[in-house]
């Protein structure tokens, strides 16, 4: 990264943090003080769909950077927090550090950088409460369809409200923060004989609150982030936990506590410590990711050596030797080597094989082996779902996101006044979510200054080659590749999955790139002010 750019980023980050410490809290809180939510209001400047980590972040940025905008968050469920409220399986935790999974505007104060799910949910609830965002969420409001009208410069949303009642809301700008997967159901392959199994079959997305696994034999099917979390978390109480994988994943260990970050917090003012801890994580992550992509063989060798060292000599490291290169799929992180320890101590084991059939007492494998079980956990992943499954129409025509181009990783070609938050797959989700929210505010402010009614990304370059959006080969990504918008071969359609590049483009880059087309629209459709509500 050029020196000047680095200075610019660090300088801006530091001054933004100082400003955040001094003024943001007061300005955001003063908004809170003047905000008078009206339950019957249905027309807004901005509607945010989803009250998870991203939706709360967008709300914060709107309050800070566009204090005159009226907005509401429509949330399908009865609670905020999204992922961190939904998943309740034992050991649920982050697999990226909280200094970057937490918001830039609100330091993570926990001692552990790899934090458990309930602490993350507390952090999100506290953030929403502190900035008065919790009062702007309408729960049990599931957006089913959004229709844009260019003549009115407005979105009309069809919403399934409390009790299944159909409601209508309108807005000038629609921002979806609805995550990337189906909340109703996880991915569950059908195996032969499943109905014969006499024990319990559980999917981590629907963990039964009262599941008692003490002294039971547990099989966890899968080798992704959820499986490697569940196995050590259940191993202490279960009789034995077997992780059954079709093929291995890369598993790397990392201390749950970030000693350097904790030292910075102990010695420096909080805002400065937060900035430095974040940048340490961002740069290290970028460094390790780039090195793994540039020198996959060396990275593979090192990861496997470390796994073998953590497992000890008695365990076959082939179970931890994937067929693909590091970062073809997301690496699995295990804090303080907890998975390796459980295996070393004999409380858990790994089997690499395929399921032939379920039996009454467990699983029969292709190799002929049998695995007995009382509980089988299918950690087989998610069903990908974009925009919370809502249908999108522009001037009467249905939008197919799978054929649209992704503009700066947040808007869709030919869809006006619409943005969607999608975080990084190789770093903390929030890094991109925060940048997306900042850019949204920049666009809104530009439209206000210029008297524009809407803006639309338009691809005018016939030589642009559409490509898959995400480089990952994970099962759920592959299953959903036709649903995902495409990226282009060059800016602003190219996705770099690189926080520094995105920061330059979204925080500092010019909005006038010739691709985002601003339209004044008819006089009567200019964005309406709703000062009485802010
Ligand atoms: C188990 C698990 C662990 C993870 N760990 C990490 C990690 O360590 N680091 C990381 O970077 N990422 C991680 N991720 C990815 C994670 O989803 C993001 O970090 C982040 O929580 C996403 O936040 P979000 O607000 O964008 O989406 P979500 O958390 O999915 O929230 C979306 C919200 O939108 C609502 N919604 C959806 N559709 C509609 C609709 N039609 N109408 C109204 N509301 C709707 C949902 O109810 C939900 O509340 C993890 C994901 C999972 C599943």
Image (cartoon, rainbow, N blue to C red):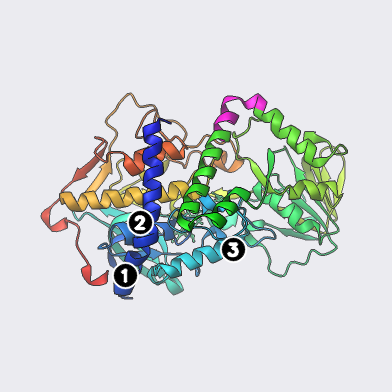
Residue tagged 2: 19
* Left or right position of 268 against 323: left
Query: Magenta region: which residues?
Result: 289-298
Alpha carbon separation for disc pair 3 and 2 = 27 Å
In the image, residue 305 sits, relative to residue 91, either above or below, namely above
| Residue at x 38% of width, y 69% of height | 136
Determine whether 107 is above or below 419 in the image. below
Tell me the residue that label 1 is attached to. 30
Q: Is residue 88 left or right of residue 16?
A: right
* Nearer mark to the viewer, of 3 and 2: 2
Quick one: 455 or 192, which is closer to the camera?
Answer: 455
Are dots 3 and 2 in contact, CB under 8 Å? no
Q: Secondary structure at mark 1?
A: helix
State which tag comes first along the sequence, 1 or 3: 1
Q: Where is residue 336 drawn, in percent x and y?
A: 71, 49
Question: Is 98 colored magenta in this rendering?
Answer: no
Quarter of the image for the N terminus: give it.
Answer: top left
Q: Is mark 3 within 8 Å of ligand 1?
A: no
Give the image location of residue 155, x and y in percent.
Answer: 28, 57
Which of the two discs, 2 and 1, labels the residue nearer the N terminus?
Answer: 2
Measure the C-alpha gap from mark 1 to mark 3.
27 Å
Q: Is residue 75 visible?
A: yes
Q: Is residue 401 above or below residue 29?
A: above
Q: Which mark is residue 119?
A: 3
Q: Is residue 371 left or right of residue 32?
A: right
CB contact under 8 Å: marks 1 and 3: no
Among numbered discs 3 and 2, the one appearing first in the sequence: 2
Is ligand 1 less than 8 Å from the beta carbon at label 2? no
């Amino acid at each position: 990264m050029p020196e000047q750019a680095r200075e610019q980023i660090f300088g801006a980050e530091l001054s933004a943090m100082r400003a955040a410490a001094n003024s943001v809290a007061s300005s955001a809180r003063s908004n809170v003080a003047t905000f008078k939510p009206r339950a019957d209001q249905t027309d807004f400047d901005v509607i945010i769909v989803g009250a998870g980590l991203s939706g709360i972040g967008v709300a914060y940025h709107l309050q800070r950077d566009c204090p005159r905008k009226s907005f509401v968050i429509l949330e399908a469920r009865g609670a905020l927090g999204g992922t961190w409220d939904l998943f309740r399986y034992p050991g649920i935790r982050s697999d990226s550090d909280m200094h970057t999974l937490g918001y830039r505007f609100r330091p993570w104060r926990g001692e552990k950088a790899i934090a458990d799910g309930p602490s993350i949910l507390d952090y999100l609830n506290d953030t929403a409460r502190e900035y008065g965002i919790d009062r702007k969420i309408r729960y049990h409001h599931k957006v089913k369809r959004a229709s844009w009208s260019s003549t009115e410069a407005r979105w009309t949303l069809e919403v399934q409200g409390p009790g299944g009642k159909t409601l209508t809301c309108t807005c000038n700008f629609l921002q979806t923060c609805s995550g990337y997967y189906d909340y109703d159901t996880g991915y569950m392959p059908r195996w032969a004989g499943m109905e014969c199994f006499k024990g319990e079959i559980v999917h981590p997305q629907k963990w039964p609150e009262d599941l008692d696994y003490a002294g039971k034999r547990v099989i966890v099917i899968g080798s992704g982030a959820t499986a490697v979390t569940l196995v050590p978390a259940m191993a202490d109480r279960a009789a034995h936990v077997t992780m059954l994988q079709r093929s291995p994943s890369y598993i790397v260990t990392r201390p749950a506590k970030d000693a350097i970050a904790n030292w910075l917090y102990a010695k420096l003012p909080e805002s400065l410590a937060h900035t430095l801890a974040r940048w340490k994580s961002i740069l290290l992550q970028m460094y390790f990711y780039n090195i793994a992509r540039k020198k996959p063989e060396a990275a593979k060798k090192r990861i496997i050596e470390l796994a073998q060292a953590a497992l000890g000599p008695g365990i076959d490291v082939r179970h931890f030797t994937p067929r693909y290169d590091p970062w073809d799929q997301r690496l699995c992180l295990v804090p303080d080597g907890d998975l390796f320890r459980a295996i070393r101590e004999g409380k858990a084991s790994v089997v690499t094989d395929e399921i032939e059939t379920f039996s009454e007492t467990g699983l029969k494998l292709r190799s002929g082996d049998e695995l007995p079980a009382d509980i089988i956990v299918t950690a087989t992943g998610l069903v990908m779902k974009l925009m919370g499954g809502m249908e999108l129409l522009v001037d009467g025509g249905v939008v197919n996101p799978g054929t649209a181009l992704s503009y700066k990783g947040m808007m869709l070609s030919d869809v006006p006044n619409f943005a969607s938050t999608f975080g990084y797959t190789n770093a903390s989700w929030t890094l991109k979510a925060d940048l997306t929210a900042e850019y949204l505010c920049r666009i809104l402010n530009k439209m206000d200054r210029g008297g524009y009614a809407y803006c639309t990304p338009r691809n005018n370059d016939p030589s642009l080659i559409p490509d898959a959006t995400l480089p990952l080969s994970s099962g759920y990504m592959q299953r959903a590749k036709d649903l995902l918008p495409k990226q282009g071969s060059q800016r602003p359609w190219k996705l770099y999955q690189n926080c520094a590049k995105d920061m330059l483009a979204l925080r500092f880059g010019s909005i006038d790139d010739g691709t985002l087309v601003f339209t004044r629209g008819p006089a009567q459709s200019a964005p309406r002010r709703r000062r009485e509500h802010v």
